[in-house]
Image (cartoon, rainbow, N blue to C red):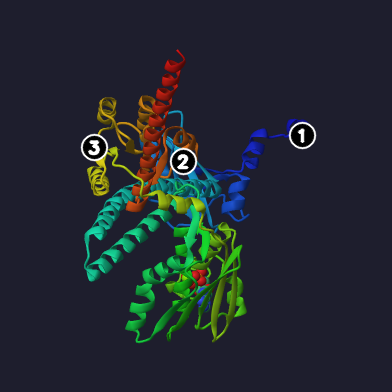
Amino acid sequence: MEYLESVADKYKFIFDKTFDQIALVDMDLYIVEANRSATVVFGMGLSIQGKKCYEIFHRRESPCVDCPLFASYETGKVVSITFYDEKIGEHFEERTYPITDDNGLLVGFIIVTRNVTTTLEIENKSYLAKKLIALGQISSGVAHDFNNVLTGVLGRIQLLKRTVKDKNLLKQINMIEKSALDGASKVAKIQEFSRTRKSKEFKTINLKELVTDVIEMTRPKWKELADKKGMIIEPVIEMSDEIHVIGDESDLRNAFTNIIFNAVDAMPEGGIIEIRAEDFNNIVKIYIRDTGVGMSDEVKEKIFDPFFTTKGHAGTGLGMSEVYGIIRSHNGMIEIESEVGKGTTIILTLPTGKKTEREKIVKEEKVETIPLNVMAIDDEEYILEVIRDILLEFGHNVATFQNPKEAIEEFKNEQYDVVLTDLGMPVMSGFDVARKIKSINKNTTVILLTGWNIKEEDDKKVTDYADYVLRKPFSIDNLVSVISESSRKVVQRIREKSEKKSKNKSASTTDNHTG
Ligand code: ADP
Ligand code: MG
């Protein structure tokens, strides 16, 4: 405080201590006065007095056409522009204030500039962040729609598979199904990116089936491409049918695909890709060996780095970092053995999966099902049609509704064993439908269908109102097995009821007897 009191010329003091660059300019555009910051920043420490403003502030040889002064003078408002100074390498905001004499005549102006580089960077980042969020929202919407479409496609394909006997045709249908499933796993990826996909779906997976699928799915890369180049790449799978791992199927598929793509890339003259696996009780070791170019120690060290690639524009460098992430999230390990000129072996370790007793029981008991009355609610007509056709095929009765409110009215009048409802509908959410149905008849099995990922905060709603959740696209097997399970419950209820009745009967007979 004392120091400030002692400052002789406080105005000059403020003028010079301000971080903004300030200059007083006359009508001929000569700088009459400039503060210290303007001298330091734009004059590089040399006096800028007596120089033209455009020379100093914009390093130009003639007056600026976009000079904010004129716009400001015409409108009576302060106009600001931003410019980039190449020599300094920073962004500035510039404001020009007109100065008029007592008669209102323009006599000069004040230029104030300020470095806004950091502000712009922050704005840019937040713009990018906003854009990413928007992109996430758009893609999760698109993913949802695609799940609906895929439900239609897969449902129809699987219905078709049940009727077609021609082997050749069946093979083609299987390929369409694989592509559709592949599409579904891509959609799941998008959902993961937009973080709407819930936690991974870990289950017991038959390794040989999975690997065979991946080899089949990557055929265009190792077969067709190799054929074109006149070379031969031969995949060999060597493992028992009995090996199971615990994992997320679409994730593991993705990891194997990346590894196989790399192996193919490493064999420009062709070669062998061998996939072997051994079960050590608690862990399964999987060896993916190629006879390709191999890797130097340097490459080996960087292989998991995101964006590290030796393939130039042909590579993204994301494959192995993705594999690493997937294997880690499976509590697994990944090792690399490689020798330049000889080939590479990628060794994955994953937890062993055991076929559970429960799964066996479900399969055995499937026989004991009775035709059910099923109500299906979805705002998309073609989804309803697929569901109806599948359930009719399995001998159930189906009523379909596009409007959930009408469905609930109908539910009050008719007896339904199972209600299948879509989650996201315009009129009423699936959760509300489920709640209403359960409040009318708590014995009705409610199955929620959804192409969205159920948010964690909605988990409770699911456990409270729904018996099952089926993610779109679902397979016929998925749908039929939950319906069969409901059917078993109905059978059990009927049995319990009749047992109770006969018990009551015998109880009343005893009563009569004593009485
Ligand atoms: P990309 O395939 O896009 O280059 P990846 O993350 O999949 O990215 O792989 C990174 C790098 O690791 C590759 O560019 C390659 O140099 C090396 N690499 C991966 N797998 C193999 C392999 N089987 N044989 C030789 N080099 C490999
Ligand atoms: Mg790769």
Against 441, is 449 above or below? below
Q: Quadrant of the C terminus?
A: top left
Q: Residues within 10 Å of mark 3 (few under 14, many from 20)?
A: some
Against 491, is 197 above or below? below
Cα distance in 3D space between marks 2 and 3: 29 Å
Residue at 25% from the left image edge and 48% from the top image edge: 386
Q: In the rendered view, does 49 fall on the left or right side of 159?
A: right
Tag 1 residue? 3
Q: Nearer the viewer, residue 303 or 182?
A: 182
User: On the image, which quarter does residue 352 sit in?
Assistant: bottom right
* Mark 3 within 8 Å of ligand 2, using the beta carbon: no
Q: In the rendered view, does 365 fall on the left or right side of 244?
A: left
SS assignment at label 3: strand
2 or 1: tag closer to the N-terminus? 1
Task: Locate residue 209, reporting x and y percent.
Answer: 43, 66
Task: Locate residue 282, reporting x and y percent.
Answer: 61, 62
Give the amino acid at mark 2: Lys
Which marked residue is nearer to the observer: mark 2 or mark 1? 2
